Structures are given as structure tokens and as C-alpha cells.
Amino acid sequence: MKALTYTHYGSPRVVQITEVPRPEPQHDEILIRVHASAVNTSDWRIRAAAFPGITALPARLIFGLRRPRNTRLGSEFAGVIEAVGPDVKSFVPGLRVFGITSKGGASAEYLALPETAAVAEIPDNLSFEEAAALPFGGLSALVFLEQFASLKANQRVLIVGASGGVGIYAVQIAKALGAHVTGLSGPDSQRLVGSLGADITLNYKTIKLSEIKDRFDIILDTVGVVSPKQARGLLRRNGLFLPLNVGMRELLAAALNPFFDRKIRLTVNPNTAQDLRQLSRLVRDGKVQPVIETVYPLAEASVAHAHVETRHRKGAIVLSILAEETDSAAVAAFGR
Ligand SMILES: NC(=O)c1ccc[n+]([C@@H]2O[C@H](COP(=O)([O-])OP(=O)(O)OC[C@H]3O[C@@H](n4cnc5c(N)ncnc54)[C@H](OP(=O)(O)O)[C@@H]3O)[C@@H](O)[C@H]2O)c1
């Protein structure tokens, strides 16, 4: 089968399409025929070994010090279950599923995963491309805002990087939770962020953080441009700052939390099946919609990687692995 691979860390040009053996599902695994796979920020960071802040050394130890230990790329996927191992209880062949894995290999024609992985049924109204566009940004936004920040109705939230991979879902999920949302992004993204439901859109080219008059209960910084000191200045009393990128200054600020009534919380999204099912429900209820900027054929995977690495995409960047007309045939064959 075809798979997206790399043998060295580097620019998007290290991305290759190679023939690799098709995986066989183990007794507790499902085998997915992948139709679409998004390229997200973690995918390009793993390909380039561009790990931010304090994650640089531990990530190199995990992914390979000098060259990648695991040569298979891709984390988000959507497709159809092709086969299941004998111990699998919750999935059957023919089911349309989507999900995310940290073990790599999702940008490939087939993917085998334990049934306990972050996999869920695709909401009926979504195409494979749309489903593949959801997990990375959608889960991060959901988990950070709802679980880590306990965002409540009528609270005021500032989303920094509101048009990025996480930001496009953070705006929608914050609105779904009833919050008042301010989105900060670039000049070309203002309309998009407004269309996602932001009450106020700010352009980082025309306003400095120090010029923002509003004060917030929650600040989610997906970019790494808000310092803990600036965040404390922008937060209301008992407000919470959630940076997605963590360096020494954030660690130091977290250690000083007991001395401030405006806190910083450093954490990571664990990508669970339970959270993915909750994200699915939000999509089914029409509260969250996938946002796709471009769908590339698998053959243009290195262009897709370069696109995401610009850090100015307007929504998800998706690879089509099995073309949509075949998708309809597969769906019809399984009677959906
Ligand atoms: N801790 C975790 O569990 C976790 C989970 C997910 C992601 N992350 C991390 O979170 C980060 C965000 O990922 P992502 O996929 O959302 O990134 P992305 O898609 O590259 O997002 C870029 C966004 O940043 C905006 N931007 C660029 N410069 C800006 C500035 N000076 N001020 C405000 N906005 C600016 C861009 O807006 P314009 O295009 O309009 O300029 C765009 O909306 C990554 O570093 C990722 O590794 C961490």
C-alpha cells in the first residue's frame, strides 16, 4: 500500500510516498481503509523536528534524536473499517470512522489501531475530508476550553490565533458554550473568524496586545505571542491563561501561580475516544462545523506540509487518499 514517509528530519521535501506492507489488525485492533488524512501542526513539527519550547529535548528523545525512529507520517484520518480483530467489540466492518493517533501512519491507504484509540463514527452529514479535518483542532479546543478552563456561558474569552488549526474550532466551541468570544488573527482572516461566530474580531497587524481595552475570563493562546505578564494584564480577577506552547517563562509563571489571582495552566490534550465522541455530538447538533482551506491529492503531500508550515492557513489542510467518487461507492456498498 502507499504511505507517507520520511527518513530524515527537514523541509517538506523530505516527505515521500512509498510502498509499505499493509498492516494486519491484531486481535484487539481495527483496520481502517483511509479515505482522507489532514496535515496538522503536530505533523509538520514531527517531520521538521521543530518542537517548541521545553518540548524540544523530550520530543527528540521520543521521536528520534538524529533521525525519525518511526518513518510513517500522519495523525488524523477518516475512512471505512475494512476488518476487525476477533476481540473487537465496538466496531464492525463497513462503519465510517474518523480519529487521531500519536503513533503516526495515518497518511496511508490503511491504518491499524487498537479499538480503544481515539476513533469514532463519522457524523452522517460529513464527507471523509470534512471528518479528517476535525480531530486535532477540534479536540484541543474542546478539551482546553471545556475541561481545563471550565468555560461558562457569558464569560469573555480571547482566542489568539483564531483562524489557525485550533483557533477555528476554539471560536466555535466557545460560542457553543455560550461565551462572548474575541478572536485575534491576521488581516486576511477577519471575515472567516467573524463567520465562525466571534463577537469581536481583532487584527494583530493593527492592534497591539497592550491596546486591547477588554478584559477576559479566559485567554487561549495558540500562537505563543502572549507572555504570562501580558496575559495577567488582560485577564479579569480569577481569570485563566492557557498557552498551547510552553517555554521556560510559562513554567516559571506557573510556579508563581500561588502569588497571583490570575492563573496560568500548562497542560496537553490527551486525544481520547470519549472526547472525540463529544466532538461528534457537537458536530451532529450543528454547533461545530469542519473548516477546510484546501484538499490536496496524496501525490501533493509535500505541498500540503509546506502550506501548514506557513502558519497562515485558513482552516484544515486535507490529503485525499481515496477519491470521493470511490467513497460514495464504498458507502453505498455498506448500505449507508
Ligand atoms: N498543548 C497541546 O495539547 C496542543 C494541542 C494542539 C496544538 N498545540 C500547539 O498549538 C499551536 C497551534 O497550532 P495550530 O494548528 O492552531 O497552528 P496554526 O494553524 O499554524 O495557527 C496559526 C494561527 O496563528 C495566527 N497568527 C500568526 N501570527 C500571529 C500573531 N502575531 N498574533 C495572533 N495570531 C497570529 C494565524 O493567523 P493569520 O493566518 O490570520 O495570520 C493563524 O490563525 C501549535 O504550536 C501546536 O503545536 C498544542
Image (cartoon, rainbow, N blue to C red):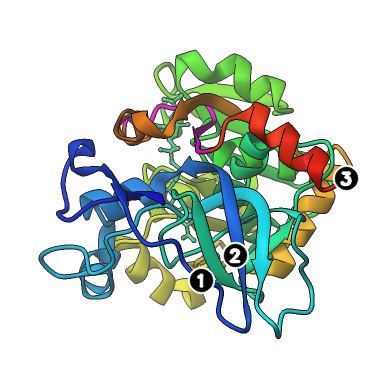
Number of numbered discs visible in the structure rendering: 3
Quadrant for residue 85, please give it. Answer: bottom right
Which residue occupies the foreground of this view, 334 or 190?
334
Q: Earlier in the sequence, mark 1 or mark 3?
A: 1
Which quadrant, please, contains the C terminus? top right
Image side of residue 224 versus residue 183, left or right:
left
Alpha-carbon span between mark 2 and mark 1: 7 Å
Which residue occupies the foreground of this view, 325 or 161?
325
Picture coordinates of residue 260, whole percent (x, y): 51, 68
SS for callout 1: loop
Name the residue located 51 percent from the left edge and 60 percent from the top edge.
111
Name the residue located 74 percent from the left edge and 33 percent from the top edge.
328
Magenta span covers which residues?
A: 310-321
Q: Label for residue 24? A: 1
- Amino acid under label 3? Gly
For the residue carrying disc 2, how many other residues have a C-alpha within 10 Å: few (<14), some (14-19), or many (20+)?
many
Cβ–Cβ below 8 Å for labels 2 and 1?
Answer: yes
SS for callout 2: strand
Q: Earlier in the sequence, mark 3 or mark 2?
A: 2
When the figure is inspected, residue 304 is found, relative to residue 219, above or below; the finding is above
Residue 290 in view (yes/no): no
When the figure is inspected, residue 28 is found, relative to residue 285, above or below; the finding is below
Residue denoted by label 2: 31
- Amino acid under label 1? Glu
SS for callout 3: loop
Q: Say whether residue 19 is magenta.
A: no
Name the residue located 52 percent from the left edge and 19 percent from the top edge.
189
Image side of residue 55 versus residue 235, left or right:
left
Q: Seen from this angle, which residue lies furthest front?
A: 333
